[in-house]
């Protein structure tokens, strides 16, 4: 399980990441996020070049957890600007993990007026 409650910090590594990297390599990339340590309880997300695979790196207090997901169809929405990280909320992370475009979620129609 990732994080405790909705206050988890989530950082997306902009651009593409070499998915041949393991936990140590991804943790080293996570160190590039200003003011964050890879073992500080934040979730770090990385995407491959094709866009159909993401990896989440998380320190659970005892060791690193590496979550990997590959879509059979489609691509994960991702910021492609050069370098740096983008901050997400826990809700946006949940949408990303499900393959939903967290940048433009379909919120549906507002509730109808009763009465």
Image (cartoon, rainbow, N blue to C red):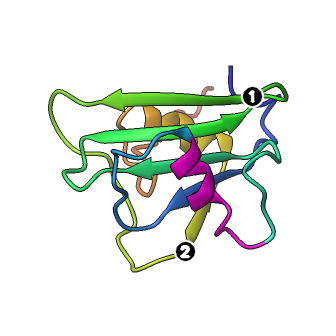
Displayed quadrant of residue 71: top left
> Magenta segment: does it hold 36?
no
**Where does the magenta region start and end?**
24-34
Q: Quadrant of the C terminus?
A: top right
Q: Is residue 67 above or below residue 10?
A: above
Q: Position of residue 11 (x, y in %)?
A: 61, 56
Residue 108 visible to the viewer: no
How many residues crowd around disc 1 within 10 Å: few (fewer than 14), some, or many (20 or more)? few
Question: Disc 2 on helix, strand or loop?
Answer: loop
The residue beneath circle 1 is 63
Q: Position of residue 83 (x, y in %)?
A: 47, 77
Q: Is residue 87 above or below residue 91?
A: below
**Mark number, residue 72:** none
Q: Residue at x 60, y 27 (%)?
A: 114
The residue beneath circle 2 is 84
Question: Disc 1 on helix, strand or loop?
Answer: loop
Residue 60 visible to the viewer: yes
Q: Residue at x 18, y 51 (%)?
A: 50
How many residues crowd around disc 2 within 10 Å: few (fewer than 14), some, or many (20 or more)? few
Q: Is residue 100 above or below residue 49?
A: above
| Label whose residue precedes the other's in the sequence (2 or 1) | 1
Q: Is residue 80 above or below residue 97?
A: below
Q: Position of residue 111 (x, y in %)?
A: 54, 34
- Disc 2 from disc 1: Cα separation: 25 Å
In the picture, measured across the screen, residue 115 lies left or right of residue 40, that is left
Disc count in the image?
2
């Amino acid at each position: 399980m990732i994080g405790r409650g909705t206050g988890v910090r989530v950082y997306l590594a902009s651009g593409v990441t070499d998915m041949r990297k393991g936990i140590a390599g991804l943790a080293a990339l996570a160190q590039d996020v200003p003011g964050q340590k890879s073992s500080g309880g934040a979730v770090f997300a990385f995407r491959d070049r094709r866009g159909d695979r993401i990896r989440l790196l998380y320190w659970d207090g005892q060791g690193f957890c590496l979550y990997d997901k590959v879509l059979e169809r489609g691509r994960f929405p991702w910021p492609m600007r050069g370098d740096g990280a983008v901050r997400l909320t826990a809700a946006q992370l949940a949408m990303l993990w499900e393959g939903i475009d967290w940048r433009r979620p379909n919120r549906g129609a507002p509730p109808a007026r009763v009465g």
